[in-house]
Image (cartoon, helix red, strand yellow):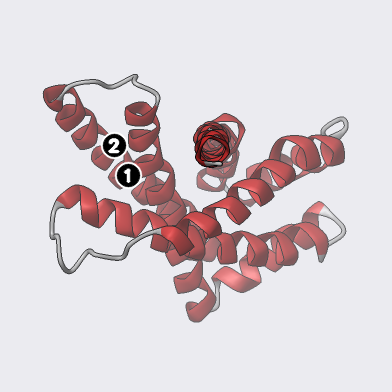
Amino acid sequence: MRFFVEKGDNTLSKFSFFIRRFHSLIALIPIGLFMCFHFLLNSAAFLGSDAYLTMVHFMKGFPFVQVLELVLIAIPIIFHGIYGIYIVYLAKNNVLQYKYYRNLAFYLQRITSLIVLAFIIWHVYTLRFAPVSAEGTYAALLSMLQNPLTFVLYVIGVVASVYHFTNGLFTFCITWGICVGDRAQKIFAICTILLFVVMSLWAVGILLSLAVA
């Protein structure tokens, strides 16, 4: 009887190992890549309203855009979000007991996951499903960002998304054995912090450009 319990536990452990690896992988590919691509496209805001509208038209007119959004974006995000909530539920929130940087980063990763999930639902509902045209999408976004409250909420959502991505990039490289050794991990941690700062400033700059358009 004991043998079957151990065998079952081993199978469950292997399943947990692989699903966590898969959860980590899709966070980078395709979700992380899409986020970077989305940032690049939205950088058209720095060039003015005409350039931004051209970008929106391009995105809405992309071949098989609905299929690509479903397969490469929506399904991975839904899985990552649902399993992420499960991880948050299991996590020990001991940040006040162990005030190490990585423990704080672990805690913030869980907090930002909930913020990002709520932000994505709001963002997609208001800008992907409600407006029916590129002009409607652009007008809806400007209306929200010109409201001080929604602008602040957007900043919080975007910065939380950037942190979740950059800190997740660090944990991905540790988990998958890409970054090995204390020295390499410390250097890479600094690099991801710098990436977080740069991407956050970049994202807020995009929001400001749209808010004053």
Residues at circles 2 and 1 in contact by the CB criterion of under 8 Å? yes
Report which quarter residue 44 is drawn in.
top right
Q: Which residue is mark 1?
A: 196
What amino acid is at disc 1? Phe
Residue 164 visible somewhere in the drawing: yes
Q: Quadrant of the N terminus?
A: top right
Q: Depth check: give the residue in front, 27 or 213.
A: 27
Q: Depth check: give the residue in front, 76 or 146.
A: 76
Q: Is residue 114 left or right of residue 95?
A: right
Q: Depth check: give the residue in front, 11 or 196.
A: 11
- For label 2, the crowd category at 10 Å Cα-Cα, with few meaning under 14, some 14 to 19 and many 20 or more, is some
For residue 67, above or below residue 120? above
For residue 55, above or below residue 49? above
What amino acid is at disc 2? Thr
Residue 61 visible somewhere in the drawing: no
Secondary structure state at the residue bearing disc 2: helix
Residue 7 image offset from top left, x and y in percent: 55, 33
Residue 188 image offset from top left, x and y in percent: 23, 29
For residue 209, above or below residue 75? below
Q: Which residue is mark 2?
A: 192
Q: Is residue 95 left or right of residue 47?
A: left
Report which quarter residue 66 is drawn in.
top right
Point out the residue furthest to the front here: 1
Q: Residue at x 55, y 69 (%)?
A: 145
